[in-house]
Image (cartoon, helix red, strand yellow):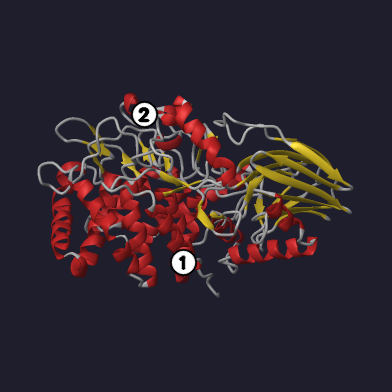
């Protein structure tokens, strides 16, 4: 394997031989377990939230003195430490003192009900009861325990753990995330944190039942699980926790409508959040506009139904269990019929409606033939054609024809003279002809020949890898999701309206994983750059987690994003490629 240079000494965080990150300054640590989530600043601040309930507030303690060592859900500084338990919703902070707690007044920004908390104290134990949950803080000698839950019963389960039990659970979790222990520090720490992003997305309800894959740190209210985010997140989980993928499919199935439509995500709130969310959905115009059903998070997304089929396909491929195909056959066939209605000219290529920003690039009005969506479509019809052989032979024939037609007409619709596929458009009108990483779905699902795939990948390397692109003026910092910027400003909105921001050129680690996986699939060199350059930037900036996206002019998105587990999934998928050279 090609060697990767270690993180330079000027990084704010330095990867260690054991995969931990060392820093002199007080870096923000994102944390997520099955119930709790939030951030911890060694300056002595915990921002706390609970899956399915929302924000609980800010807890202040005496500060930690550096230097610091950071690992998934753990930060240590000499004799002081921050540890998150896995089995119960409780946090341990050792050798510190509780100072004060400011309870949240709202579950989230949209909450119109809100409410005040009630405080009770018994000795060193303080309890705050909010309308949507309970927080208990106990000064236990030199340690502080923070437990939270939907109710007293759940929070008290956390306090039942000893400090040593919490430390041991934290260490076992870190060991489980350490999937490449023999690698050099940069690669090892990337895999450790990227695996953490995927595993920590597994959420539970207050009874310990599966409650969806979270998209990331900022998604507890309303609690929702996405079709597309979940798909890229579960690529690692298929190898680690396949039973979780099965549960995710069952949950996503509840969002498929009889006509094959699906929202961006499925809402799965706890009791403390459901009433408040429904009140906001019905009475707040900013919320009502995009959420037409109680269970929908952003109704009617163009890519979601296809990801439902592709998730089942990947689960079948990994486990050999085809029972889901039979169980959800009505939904699967309805999805195929839905997309057939978007096809014109009998060419097998569904057209995304005009003025529609509802796929992963949800700040861009992509319409007509969209390379990313067409890749998903071809992958979906191929899977259904296979399953339908014994289930519905007529549908099998339809899907075989749809796949063949789509492949035959794809080049006429989107292939550019430079050898890559345009982002979106209609050759008879306007085509956004820049190169995008998400167009690699065409390669992932076999829509093009191996020769064409290698040609596209060469274009990606020279134009989207910033080390080879002198036209963007920020040097070597990662892999851009698109270049050059969008030609029509009117096609973009919000964050993507800014050049180099969000869908308009930022680095998205999940797409880096897709790119690296595609390079390996076609036996091309260079996968280490997309797998590690984003992580090196995180370390340079002091971002202690697998971020959602970033770019030099605009900084980062969320600190701990589930689908940023894709780079680790690629390493686990090709273990022999990444084993260190014994010599």
The answer to whether residue 292 is left or right of residue 342 is: right
Q: How busy is the neighbourhood of tag 2: few (under 14 within 10 Å), some, or many (20 plus)?
A: many
Position of residue 172 measured from the top left corner of the image (x, y, whole percent):
66, 66
- The residue at which mark 2 appears reads as 492
Please name the residue shown 77% across and 49% down the image: 67
Q: Earlier in the sequence, mark 2 or mark 1?
A: 1
The answer to whether residue 429 is left or right of residue 63 is: left
Q: Secondary structure at mark 2?
A: loop
Position of residue 114 measured from the top left corner of the image (x, y, whole percent):
62, 31
- The residue at which mark 1 appears reads as 242
Q: How busy is the neighbourhood of tag 1: few (under 14 within 10 Å), some, or many (20 plus)?
A: some
The answer to whether residue 194 is left or right of residue 72 is: left
Viewer-proximal residue among 367 and 92: 92
Please name the residue shown 50% across and 66% down the image: 241
Q: CA distance from mark 2 to mark 1?
A: 37 Å
Disc 2, disc 1: CB below 8 Å?
no
Q: In this picture, is 448 found above or below 54? A: below
Position of residue 480 measured from the top left corner of the image (x, y, whole percent):
42, 42
Res. 62 in view: no
Please name the residue shown 58% across and 61% down the image: 188
Res. 542 in view: yes
Q: Quadrant of residue 158?
A: bottom right
Q: In this picture, is 71 found above or below 116? A: below
Position of residue 339 measured from the top left corner of the image (x, y, whole percent):
22, 47
């Amino acid at each position: 394997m090609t060697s990767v240079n270690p993180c330079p000494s000027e990084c704010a965080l330095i990867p260690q031989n054991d995969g931990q990150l060392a820093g002199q300054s007080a870096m923000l640590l994102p944390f997520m377990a099955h119930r709790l989530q939030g951030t911890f600043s060694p300056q002595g601040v915990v921002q706390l939230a609970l899956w399915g309930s929302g924000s609980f507030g800010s807890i202040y303690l005496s500060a930690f003195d550096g230097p610091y060592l950071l690992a998934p859900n753990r930060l240590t500084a000499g004799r002081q430490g921050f540890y998150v338990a896995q089995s119960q919703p409780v946090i341990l902070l050792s050798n510190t003192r509780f100072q004060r707690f400011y309870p949240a007044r709202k579950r989230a920004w949209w909450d119109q009900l809100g409410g005040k908390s009630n405080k009770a104290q018994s000795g060193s134990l303080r309890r705050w009861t909010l309308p949507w949950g309970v927080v208990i803080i106990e000064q236990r000698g030199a340690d502080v325990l923070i437990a939270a839950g939907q109710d007293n019963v759940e929070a008290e389960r956390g306090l039942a753990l000893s400090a040593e039990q919490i430390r041991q659970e934290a260490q076992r979790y870190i060991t489980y995330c350490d999937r490449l222990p023999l690698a050099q520090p940069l690669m090892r720490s990337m895999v450790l944190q990227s695996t953490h992003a995927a595993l920590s997305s597994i959420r539970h309800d207050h009874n310990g039942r599966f409650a969806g894959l979270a998209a990331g740190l900022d998604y507890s209210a309303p609690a929702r699980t996405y079709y597309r985010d979940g798909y890229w997140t579960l690529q690692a989980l298929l190898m680690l926790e396949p039973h979780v993928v099965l549960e995710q499919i069952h949950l996503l199935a509840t969002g498929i409508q009889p006509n094959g439509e699906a929202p961006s995500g499925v809402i799965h709130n706890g009791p403390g959040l459901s009433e408040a969310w429904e009140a906001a959905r019905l009475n707040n115009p900013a919320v009502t506009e995009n959420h037409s059903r109680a269970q929908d998070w952003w109704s009617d997304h163009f890519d979601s139904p296809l990801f439902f089929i592709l998730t089942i396909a990947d689960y079948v491929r990994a486990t050999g269990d085809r029972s889901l195909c039979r169980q959800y056959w009505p939904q699967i066939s309805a999805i195929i019929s839905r997309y057939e209605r978007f096809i014109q000219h009998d060419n097998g290529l569904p057209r995304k409606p005009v003025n529609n920003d509802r796929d992963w690039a949800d700040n861009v009005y992509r319409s007509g033939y969209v390379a990313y969506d067409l890749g998903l479509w071809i992958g979906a019809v191929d899977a259904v054609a296979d399953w339908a052989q014994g289930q519905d032979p007529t549908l099998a024939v339809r899907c075989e024809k749809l796949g063949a037609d789509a492949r035959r007409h794809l080049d006429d619709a989107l292939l550019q003279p430079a050898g890559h596929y345009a982002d979106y458009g209609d050759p008879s009108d306007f085509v956004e002809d820049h190169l995008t990483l998400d167009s690699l779905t065409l390669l992932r699902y076999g829509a093009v020949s191996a020769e064409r795939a290698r040609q596209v990948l060469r274009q990606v390397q020279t134009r989207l890898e910033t080390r080879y692109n002198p036209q963007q003026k920020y040097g070597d910092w990662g892999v851009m999701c698109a270049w050059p910027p969008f030609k029509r400003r009117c096609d973009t909105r919000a964050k993507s309206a800014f050049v180099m921001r969000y869908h308009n050129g930022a680095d998205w680690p999940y797409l880096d994983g897709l790119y690296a996986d595609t390079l390996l699939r076609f036996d091309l060199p260079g996968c280490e750059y997309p797998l590690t350059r984003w992580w090196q930037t995180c370390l340079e900036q002091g971002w202690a987690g697998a971020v959602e996206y970033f770019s030099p002019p605009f900084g980062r998105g969320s600190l701990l994003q589930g689908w940023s587990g894709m780079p680790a999934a690629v390493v686990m998928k090709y273990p022999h490629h990444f084993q260190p050279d014994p010599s």
